[in-house]
Amino acid sequence: MDNLDETKLNEAILRLFYDLPFIGMAITSPETKCWVKFNDRLCEILGYSREELPHITWTEITHPDDLELDVVEFERVMRGETEGYVMDKRFIRKDRSVIHASIDVKCVRKEDLTIDFFIATVQDISDRKLAEARQKQAEQALAKSEERYRQVVQTQIDFVLRSQPDTTITFANESLCRALGKTLDQVIGLKWIDLAPADELQSTLQKISTLSPLNPSFLAENQDKRADGQIGYTQWINQGVFDDQGQLIGIQSTGRDVTAIKHAEMALKKLNDELEIRIEQRTADLQQSEARNLAIIKALPDLLLLLKPDGTCIQCILPSTDDKSKYIPIKHHISEVLSPEDLQVQIKIAETAIATGEVQIYEHQLTKFGKTVYEEVRITPYGADELLVIVRDITNHKLAEEQLIKSDAHLKVAQRISKLGSWEFDLRTGDVIWSEEVFRIFGRAPAFGTPTYPELQKSLHSDDWEYFDQVVQNAIATCQSYEVEYRICWADGTLIYVLARGEIICDLMGNAIQIVGTLLDISDRKEIEQQLQNLTDRLTLAIKSASIGIWEWDIAHNCLVWDERTYELYGINPDQSSDAYLAWVSRVHPSDRAIAETAVQLALNGEKEYEPEFRIVLPDGNIRYLKAYALVQRNTDGEPQRLIGINFDITDRKLAEELLLKSDTHLKTAQRIGKLGSWEFEVNTGKLTWSDEVFRIYGLEPSGNPPDYDQLQLYIHPEDWQNFDQTVQAAMSLEQSYDLEHRIIQPNGTLIYVMARGEMIYNVSGQLTHIIGTAIDITDRKLAEAKILHAANQLANTNRELESFSYSVSHDLRAPLRHMNGFVNALQQRLKNHEALQDPKVTHYLQVIEKSSQKMGHLIDGLLTLSRFGRRPLESKQISIRDLVDEAIEIIRTDPSHNPLIEFAIGDLPTTVGDRTLLQQVFHNLIGNAVKFSRNQPQPYIEIDSLPDQTIRIRDNGVGFQMEYADKLFGAFQRLHNDSEFEGTGIGLAIVQRIVQRHGGSIWAEGYPDQGATFFIKL
């Protein structure tokens, strides 16, 4: 009875095993090679029904390319060389499609060791194979395109740093600093070799040591710890920087973060390793089986339970493999491992299994051994009131799914970063699959779906579609891969350049059934190519505009080639000269020929760069100066092979240098003559630079070194040093220029007066770097000023005494004159009473006395006025000259003797600042004089206006004057006409000049006899 129950149990277990949904199970005949028993999953994999499959041998549906290996392994088992075999192979399904499968075949022998039957497991691995093919295809596509868009990728790198040959970092960009979690100051000075993994240290140092101009760079891929604590991977391109001697002076490194790609690779490897482990484990379990049911049971990595409907455990069978550690043995009830919530869920599912009689499958999540695990539970009725439960730990499967999702996300990120999308096109159904990056490249939202192939024409540039379609159709017809560039037009007008690659997948008959490929956005590369073309065009234009001649000397074949401009520079007709070298030698100035040829030899020997200057003699005898540069190209042995160089005319520069040298000499001479020296002070270093004249001013020899700033105190007068230092320091602090006078005591004791000026010089960052200035010896001026000041004081005293004397004399003279006038009047009355005035002589004498006294009074009044205007303090304010002129004319017109025929022409007049009363006297006198001296003209005309520089002009058409007497016009009591012609005292213009001069101005006159006079006033 126990054997019967055990058999029944084994059959139930076998039935559940056959019902597993993820693996095909079969028993085959060794004689017919037909399928004897199999589960539904095998039918799904092979595409045949249960009725069809028994009539088909496994050799009939094995792919022809795999059949030979399969048969060889089968025969080995038949001969007893092995008990089974495992292999990947392809089956041809009923619909003629090909499916990839992993098979595990084991034989079951009879007691006589002959084979009774074969047990086979078949697992569909088509998705894995397709993924591997796509990955390989993507890797090949990326490898092929890597070199083509390397420059584009380099413009999109994440990390940039520069370092010294010992890897000390001298510059790092913000992305690298951010990744390291350090500031730029913290990164500068670090050695990036210290950041490299220890196991890669020697390899990296070796690569650095081999850097040379012939081997200027190397690639490295490092593992590093990021600022967030995560481990990252960076792919570096390290480019050596060399000096003119080829010595390594620095390393330019660009790094690209490949962490996402590395993680994807590791995830795929982990997934593959897990699959291999599971396959190996399953294979080992099957190899240990001796009988069909025992082999199946032992091969299961599952926990088997026989339960009551309420969860009571009747029997608990742990896996015989290491998988048993994944499960907790159940002694009495499943509540020992399930939470109350999970227990109720399983009881309800068990009730459903009993009610329906069908297998129930569900998954649950629980915590075991301190970690979260996932399990798949299969429940099937067993007998009247029992349940057979198979529990499988699917934690690894779940984690693999999560990792696959992460890998897919990383792949999307990698595609976005590299602007490389992937796509598939099913030629049989017309279905198109795009990655997210392809949608971005096409400027199309994924919500709108992928377009069909004909609809694709709307997105392509109209000029590119026909060629694109022709390339694709030809690839389909020939089953060959293709590569094509075209343009995509976005809805907003944006133009995107892309490089498309496609691989054609064909069926067994050689018919194209699918296209898989990549789409690379090369817009940035195109832009860079355009920029390079622009740079090339600019270089060509620069060479033409700069009249640069280019030449090349093939040393190995002793062949010198010139371009057209070089022939023009040397004045040689290329059609008349077959030997360029002889032509060059013939044109080089005889005195410079040895220098030029020596320069070539030194460059070839590697001793010196080729950059000589030499003269050439043109056919017309003119001498021109040329500058030459050349680079030597050498082979791997360092032997010179080619010399490529340029020549350009520097005659104008040479002449300018000679002129500059002459100007410098003149400047030094001018500074010496003018006692004006120049200097420069470096703020950071305190270094002071003097011209020769500054040395002479300080009484020092120009051949020596100038003192520093602190040592200046030894030469500057003690009483002046504090003011000098405070002025300089304040100028530096306030960032402004300064101007001051101070005294210097020369070593021989001589006292020198100096005018010092300084200007602040700043760099592009606004930092004070230099002070430049001048020092002027003003000793002679100071002595002259002292003499002038002394003379001015003496003159002022004399003027004060003179004015006092004039006033006193004028005042004292007026009293006798009044007495004279009084007595003359009294005498006239008495003579009139005595009729003595009848005598003409008496009358004449009295009139002469009266007029003379009156004239003397006028002269005294003028003298007092002149004295008063010289002493009167100025009351300055804003004044309109037009108002003063109008007032003066109005006063003149009120004079009863005014000539109404006089015409006044008044133009634009300025405003000024001055004393209104005094300036009113100026215009009254000048306009009055113009009226007086033009009164005899039939049409008197007076014009008053101003010149562009604000000079006021008063012009008349009167009697004028001779210019030789112009300097006498403004002298006191100086007159060019007698009283019988024009009355006056000769004091008016002297008063005018005194007032104008007190306002800091000047006055002058121009005139010609009978052509009028013009007076000019500059205030």
Image (spheres, rainbow, N blue to C red):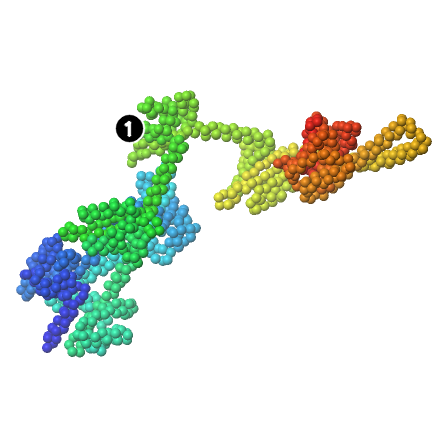
Q: Residue at x 9, y 57 (%)?
A: 60
Looking at the picture, does residue 523 appear above or below residue 102?
above
Name the quarter where the N terminus is drawn: bottom left
Q: Residue at x 14, y 66 (%)?
A: 39
Q: Nearer the viewer, residue 766 or 163?
A: 766
- The percent coordinates of residue 181 (x first, y second) are 39, 55
Q: Residue at x 22, y 68 (%)?
A: 376
Up-down relation of residue 935 to residue 280 (above or below): above
Within the image, what quadrant is residue 864 found in?
A: top right
Q: Nearer the viewer, residue 317 or 136?
A: 136
For residue 347, say whether it is visible: yes
Q: Is residue 985 left or right of residue 351?
A: right
Q: Amino acid at mark 1?
A: His
Left/right placement of residue 630 relative to residue 328 reads: right
Q: Position of residue 790 (x, y in %)?
A: 72, 35
Which percent across, then down, holds residue 916? 71, 42
Question: Residue reaching furthest left?
Answer: 112
Q: Is residue 903 above or below residue 142?
A: above
| Residue that mark 1 sits on | 557
Compared to 361, does 704 lie above or below?
A: above
| Res 800 → quadrant | top right
Secondary element under disc 1, as helix, strand or loop, is loop
Q: Quadrant of the C terminus?
A: top right
Q: Residue at x 48, y 30 (%)?
A: 657
| Left or right for 12, reference 832 | left
Residue 198 visible: no
